[in-house]
Amino acid sequence: MIVKPKVYIARRVSKEVQEYISNFCDLEMNEGDEILSREGIIKNYNYIDGLITIGTKIDEEFLDSMPNLKVVSNISVGYDNFVIKDMKKKKIVGTNTPDILNDTVADLTFGLILSLARRIPELDRITKAGMWEKVYPEEYVGTEVHHKTLGIIGMGRIGEAVAKRAKLGFDMDVLYYNRHRKEEIENKLGVKYSSKDKLIKNSDFIVILTPLTEETYHFIDAREFNLMKKSAIIINVSRGQTINELALIDALKTGKIAGAGLDVFEKEPTDKNNPLLRMDNVVTLPHIGSGTWKTRNDMSMMAAENMVSALQGNIPKNLVEELA
């Protein structure tokens, strides 16, 4: 009798994904709307061989409590929940789900840009409240997006998708800052490599797309806000901790920048009393960058395929580079 490896999925996925994994593994899944806590996983599923999750911190303490665990498959591009040195020590395979969400996140990025520039959520509230009392009210005007300068911090696949929309759809000048220069993208799209400070000083819209690492923690802080145009709008669709939230709040309150579009926060879910939630020049979203049914399902299927491949002794397609 062949004993199938045991896999637990910490977030509900489609029947299609469940059926795929069940062909190869004994599957259990969280049926609730919230991802099961790591304490809950340790308490109830410490016998599993594979874990499919989002954001569960995988460190030495967790791994010591999961003696059979071999593979952790993230349903996300980021893997800042992986403590790489601890996973290497325990020889744990870790995977992620890149590329699938590139266009979806790029679409949302431009949704935030347009929402802030043209004040769409704010004016929607005014109109619905019956406060539209005259034709063409000058106090409701916004700013253009087309032909402005967009600065992208973190030119990965999502950054490239954002740059493509900016150049081809809105005739924007695009600057980018990245650890490594991407001359192929420069030649392909006509974007320009820039130093961090030059990008921050010259951009009308700044999009944060860098992954969260020790180097990018609070990558945008009070110093950077002091360099920005007073008309600048900042968009964060990466990780909340890449921006010092207190410095952002101060920059918005004191008029150092014009607005912010946030899909991520330093603490998630963010505190109900967070001042950012009460500012008209801030558009806030509940970390929904990949949030379309198709993209989420495709990411879940990729995570499942990564899991099955690794448990079968193969090198999964999306093995996290640092764990190779």
Image (spheres, rainbow, N blue to C red):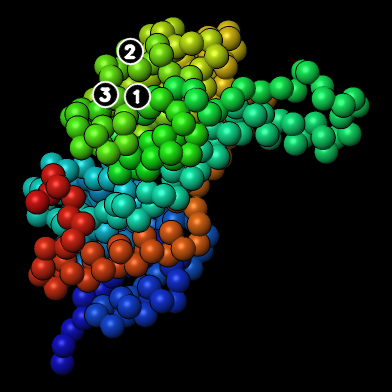
Neighbours of disc 1 within 10 Å: few (<14), some (14-19), many (20+): many
Q: Do the residues labelled 2 and 1 touch (CB within 8 Å)?
A: yes
Residue 109 visible at all: no
What kind of element bears circle 2? Answer: helix
What whole-number distance in Å separates the C-alpha atoms at marks 2 and 1? 9 Å
132 relative to 308 in the view: left or right: right
Residue for badge 2: 198
* Among numbered discs 2 and 3, the one appearing first in the sequence: 3
What kind of element bears circle 3? Answer: strand
Vertical side of 164 occupied by 73: above or below: below
What whole-number distance in Å separates the C-alpha atoms at marks 3 and 1? 6 Å
**Quadrant of the rendered structure where residue 156 is?**
top left
Residue 254 visible at all: yes
Where residue 292 appears, as percent x and y from the top left, is: 50, 57
Which label belongs to residue 193? 3
82 relative to 121 in the view: left or right: left
Task: In this rendered view, identify the residue nearer to me: 273 or 67.
Answer: 273
Which label belongs to residue 175? 1
Q: What amino acid does circle 3 point to?
A: Tyr
11 relative to 219 in the view: left or right: right
